[in-house]
Amino acid sequence: MGTWNKDAAVPLLSLEISLGRVTSFSVTLYACLVLRARSYPGSHPAVPSSPPDNKMSMFGRFQESKKQWRNCIVACFAIYALGFLFFYYSFPAFGDFARPHHHHAVSVTKQSKYVKPDNITVSGLVFYGRQSRVEIMKCYIERNLVENGGWLDEVLWVVNTEQKGDLRYLEEVLASNPQRYKKIYSDEIAGTYTYKNIWKKLDRGKYYVKIDDDVVWIDDDAIPSLVTRKVQNPKDFVVSGNIINNPPLGFFHMRMGAIHPYFPEAFEPFSVTNATDYWRPSRHPSWDGPKKYKWELKNEPPSWPHHRWLRVPDDSMLDQTPAAELKYDIWGDSYRNWAIVSQMHMSLFENIEKKQLDLYRFEKTWTMYEDRIRINFMCVYSDDILDTDPENWPQGRGDEDMIVLDLPKKLRRPVVIQGDALAAHYQYMDQKKLESTDILRRYQSIAKDKYCLNLDAARGVAEPDLKQRSIRGLFSTPSGYDV
């Protein structure tokens, strides 16, 4: 047998790297061969001082130098043990190899039980303000465009910010699909009592799906379901989605079994996985604490940034978690408390991972009567709104007050919740402490891992066109659409 050469392991290691499956065994093998070569300088090509002994073999070398071989074997075992720890316990540098996960090609063609009528126009109406949210939502908008098997014929992006970075990103969005995306201005930056200036700009004869810019997840059938309900039931004034983080729906989600026990991690982690499917609760450890622990709503978030909420293994502890305090309430803790909404978001990730979104769904619509529902994600028919003369809506009444309370009562027309139109709303103003969690990162992760179509590269966004759009032009406020 010839001498050992560390290059013998290179093909194996290179193959595993190319396949994205480096193992502790291959690293150990490579390291051992290097150690073996370094232990025997004579194993490298050299000019022999005497004729080589053809009988000299690895076994012969082993007999001649048992001590060196013992040292080499001990070192190999040590390297293997370290490799095992690195590759199986999710150190950040090796997070993607921590355990197997599956990548699914995101399909443009979606199968749905809903068929869009040929004679209707469906427009998305996005109240735009924040890039950090819309970077996520844009994936779901693209999935719902007609060319991708969705129902949106156009999307109107309502400019409602003066932040230059956010405005710049909006221009990138518009340039990515100028055929479908249009920009619309209000008369001023809208607030609670001036959103009416946006509603008066609708076109007659269209169905509008209004989407807040922090709707960070939309089920594939949600928009078709909303529009179908509205088309088939024209008397409905508003058809709202079944929304995670939209009081009072959390109260029902809790009692339907859709919310699961979660607590924030007790200690800052030494390492966190950086896997592409970071969003999955199963990617992270379970919560480990006393069985009698109960979360108080007055509790503050952990001190370190982007803390995680971890699954409590014992389902019987659900009544000790924040969501146990959910009530049929529009305001109060069910609306304000950051811990309750954290648990609701984490439960959604679990339900997506386990393919159990039916836990949220209900077959018959719920009628809200005179109860408020938030207008994060809903469908209206433009003529219904325009016939009420939005420009002259009463002072001191916001668009939500008018659309889901005052006008339905006056017109004697219902506001309904469509049970299978699922979506997630990230945050209300009073839920600021939600930003101390990693939940927005999880929504970024799930969008990239399961929903984004990566169409920008295919289209080739025209950078010269973007450069021609000046920041100064972004602050102009022409009436109507800017196309």
Image (spheres, rainbow, N blue to C red):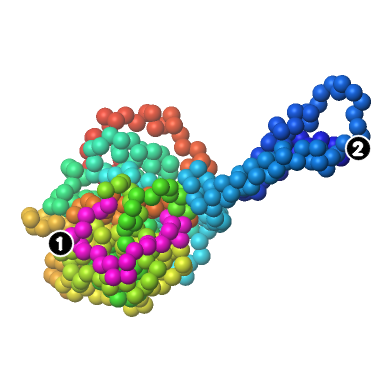
Q: Earlier in the sequence, mark 1 or mark 2?
A: 2
Categorize mark 2 by other alpha carbons within 10 Å: few (<14), some (14-19), many (20+): few
Question: What's drawn in magenta, residue-wise?
Answer: 279-302
Which residue was labeled with disc 1?
401
Question: Could you tell me which secondary element the residue under label 2 belongs to?
Answer: loop
Mark 1: amino acid: Asp
Q: Is residue 222 left or right of residue 186?
A: right
**Residue closer to the observer: 23 or 206:** 23
**Residue 368: x, y in percent?**
22, 73
Mark 2: amino acid: Lys
The answer to whether residue 295 is magenta is yes
Q: Residue at x 72, y 38 (%)?
A: 68
**Residue 40: x, y in percent?**
75, 32
Indicate the quadrant containing the N terminus: top left, top right, bottom left or bottom right.
top right
Q: Residue furthest bottom?
A: 364
The answer to whether residue 448 is magenta is no
Q: Which mark is residue 55?
A: 2
